[in-house]
Image: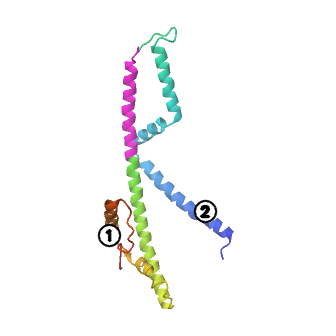
Amino acid sequence: MISPHQTHSSFPDVAEENIKAVAQLQHREAQKRSLVARLSDTVTSLAAREWTVAAHLALFVSWALVNTGRIPYVHPFDPFPFSFLTLLVALEAIFLSLLVLASQNRLTQEADRRAHLDLQINLLSEQEMTLVLRMLHEICEHLNLRTTTSSPTFQQLVKRTDVSQLADLLENRLSQDGQPADDHDTHRTPR
């Protein structure tokens, strides 16, 4: 029997290993980024902060006060309707939008790569689990334990999953009624 102390002490080692692996993947992705991508991410990060909103508000109020002649001894340099301010704000919006789009595009590409990795790991896990079920089936047959192994559910799970067939079934089902497929028996084929 495993003591609570053994479970507690072994779990952090496994978790730490997984955390390190994920951190290494993220570090490698960060190292691959170009100078433009790093700049884009930095600008996007700065633009999304609360103090940036406060700084813009302070700038616009100050600009309006100066250029409406409300501050004594300061001569307006961009009288109402603030054409120069409008130009600056439009340019900032254009460049900020482009940088945000570039960052979002890169993040989408990273998410796609992670999803592909997840799919590969899931497929490998499914193949491993099917093999384990087959081994369990052989052990049960050897010990003459057939209640579970003769069940229709077990018989379906021990078959190989046909990913293409499963994807087609899901796509057809979603296109028909927008609901996920619930047929469990049509996506496995004998191995």
Q: Position of residue 98 (x, y in %)?
A: 36, 37
Residue at x 53% of width, y 61% of height: 18
In the rendered image of this protein, does residue 157 appear above or below residue 86? below
Quarter of the image where the C terminus is located: bottom left
SS state under label 1: helix
Q: Position of residue 139 (x, y in %)?
A: 49, 86
Q: Is residue 101 magenta?
A: yes
In the rendered image of this protein, does residue 179 appear above or below residue 33? below
Q: Is residue 149 magenta?
A: no
Q: Quadrant of residue 40?
A: top left
Q: Which residue is mark 1?
A: 165
Query: In the rendered structure, which amino acid carries the disc numbered 2?
Result: Pro
For the residues labelled 1 and 2, say whether their Cβ atoms are less than 8 Å apart: no
Query: In the rendered structure, which amino acid carries the disc numbered 1?
Result: Gln
Marks 1/2: CA distance? Answer: 39 Å
Quarter of the image where the N terminus is located: bottom right
Tell me which label, 1 or 2, sits earlier in the chain: 2
Q: Position of residue 90 (x, y in %)?
A: 37, 28
15 to the left or right of 1: left
148 to the left or right of 179: right
Residue at x 38% of width, y 71% of height: 183
Q: Quadrant of residue 127?
A: bottom left
Magenta stretch: give its range: 78-105
31 and 183: which is toward the camera: 183
Q: Which residue is mark 2?
A: 12
Q: Position of residue 184 (x, y in %)?
A: 39, 72
Decide whether the magenta segment is chiefly helix, strand or loop. Answer: helix
Number of the label disc, if any, that sits on residue 40 = none
